[in-house]
Image (tube, rainbow, N blue to C red):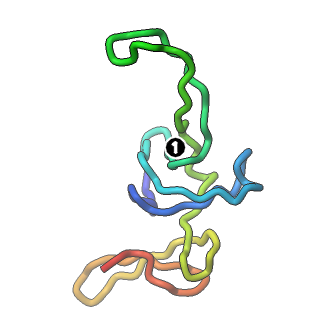
Amino acid sequence: MKLKLKKNDTVIVVTGKERFAQKTGKVLKIFREEGRVVVQGVNFVKRHTRPSAKNQQGGILEKEASLPLSNVMLYCPRCKKGSRVGIKVMADKTKLRFCRRCEETLDKS
């Protein structure tokens, strides 16, 4: 699967239960085969755990669950919105991602 997202990109949720809050977060992990992504601070689920050597207490833990890739868009800091991503090939054959709305370069170089 060809992706235009990378780890540590800032994304905004465009569909699902987090949409109306306009939640944004940093990409923590990408599952390419499943087409899913884990975003920091978005889509919390409760996990019931038994006491173990790692977690002596046990109990209910909250953690981020994965979202489908189609539910998030890359966040453009200039537009302050989610944006579609284009790719420019520079003269020295390097690739740069850019916002399709405002033409702002999204990669830090």
Give the residue at x 44% y 58%.
Answer: 3
Q: Is residue 88 above or below residue 69?
A: below
State the image quarter where residue 80 is shown: bottom right
92 or 24, which is in the foreground? 24
Q: Is residue 80 above or below residue 69?
A: below
Q: Position of residue 60 (x, y in %)?
A: 57, 20
88 or 25, which is in the foreground? 25
Residue under numbered circle 1? 36
Instruction: Check disc 1 and give the amino acid type.
Output: Arg
Give the residue at x 63% y 52%.
Answer: 71
Q: Position of residue 14 (x, y in %)?
A: 68, 58
User: Residue at the left extreme?
Assistant: 92
**Left or right, 13 with reference to 75:** right
The residue tagged with tag 1: helix, strand or loop?
A: strand
Q: Is residue 84 above or below residue 16?
A: below
Q: Quadrant of the C terminus?
A: bottom left
